[in-house]
Image (tube, rainbow, N blue to C red):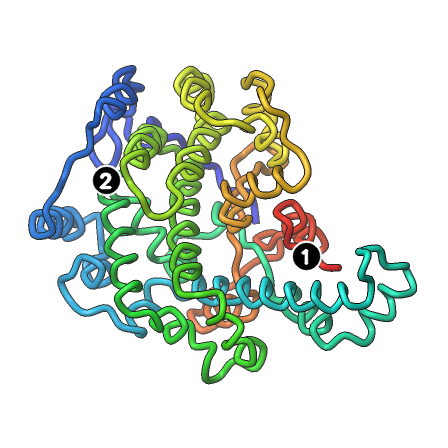
Amino acid sequence: MQASNLRSESELYPTGHTRNGASTHTDSHVDSDLDNGYLETISTEEGSSECLKVIYAPQFEFEDMLAPILGVSDIDAHVLRSLLPVHLQSLMLMHGWMYTQHEVRHELASICPDGRCTIQQLAGFRDSSFHMKRLSHLYREIAYVDYTRLNGDQRRVLFPLVDALAQLPARWILQLLDRLRAAITNHPGLLLAASGVEKNDPLLGPLVAGIRGVGSKALHDGLINELLVSTSAVLAVTGQFPKLQQLAGLLKRWNPGHPLPGAHFIGLLVLEYGGPAFRDWAVAWLGRFSGSRYAARQLGWDQAAGWLPPDHHPTGGSTAQWLLRDLTAAMYVYPSRHRNGAAALWIRVRRSPTQGLLRKDSQLLFDDVWFPQDRVQSLLDSVGLILP
């Protein structure tokens, strides 16, 4: 399969407007307007009505999908699973991974109290530790698929909610995420129920108690942050840079838990993929954040790193890992480039359910859609999710 030839928004909409009617030309006032407090407030009733007008338009076929989030109908485990068919499995897999990793570190601390294990001690531990074996089984299920190499049907099968969000105006993206957060907050067990891991999952089922132990807020924040960074990355690789500018400004007024990393990440995305037309805006925007050049280099974004000044405060060690972890939602997404320079966007999934879902829908993934498994560990290592 050849890499997708992604076109910019201006190529897709030569009249100078995006699919949502926004100008594709940069606006020097967009950031200042937002800085001065611009944030259109939409009441629940008006917001639902206005969103549905767009969603019911011929180019959008998401009314059934998004109606529960808009409050038009109830959201339950079945509805949530249809919105996030692979996302919830990935979320639970990573929380199961982090819980098991904590157990492994606890065991290691009892074997090597000073934190220094010999090669022989580590080898013996890997062979004998129940939790270490479980961690290895979990690791084999962690995979990444390249969104840019999926066809439209495959994107809708695997990532229907992100695919829908990326086609809405910036303020509605945040409104829908707010409503989703409210729905899952009001029903603390909804994510676990929708994921299906409690009843019939031999790998994650035994870890349900540990996953619950991380707390509902951690699961909810994790989901919303992953949706935010993945939607932002999709906007970047599909050339919707004016919308990303608006989204960055709106995030300053939005509080899903950790809004600033999302705004920081958007600035880096615009700088790397937006090209010279958006360089001045992105560099100025990133001036309010620390560690931007370091993060760009760690992600392999040579263009963005080359346009950024040296970081005022050098970033290293665990601080660097936490920066990258915040920006990418613990490497839920890895935007990069193909060898020909075209944009690539790797999104984390759980391998076996993803393959099963596509097989059920008569879809087939070529090998080049999957991130090389021998390199997955390097992505996890970059954000501190390591195998001992």
Q: Which residue is mark 2?
A: 171
Q: Quadrant of the C terminus?
A: bottom right
How far across and down, in percent of the image, does residue 155 sit? Answer: 41, 55
The quarter of the picture where residue 243 lies is: top left
**Identity of the residue furthest to the front in this view:** 113
2 or 1: tag closer to the N-terminus:
2
The amino acid type, in three-letter code, at marker 1 is Gln
Q: Which residue is mark 1?
A: 373
Q: Nearer the viewer, mark 2 or mark 1?
A: 2
From the viewer's side, name the closer residue of 284 and 83.
284
How far across and down, in percent of the image, does residue 104 sit? Answer: 70, 67
Direction from residue 134 to residue 326 in the image, left or right: left
Disc 2 crowd, CA 10 A, few/some/many (<14, 14-19, 20+): some
The quarter of the picture where residue 351 lies is: bottom right
Task: Please give the label number shown on residue 84.
Answer: none
How far across and down, in percent of the image, does residue 180 sit? Answer: 28, 58
Direction from residue 381 to residue 267 in the image, left or right: left
Q: Residue at x 61, y 47 (%)?
A: 383
Vertically, is 130 above or below 290?
below
How far across and down, in percent of the image, does residue 185 sit? Answer: 30, 63
From the viewer's side, name the closer residue of 113 and 173.
113
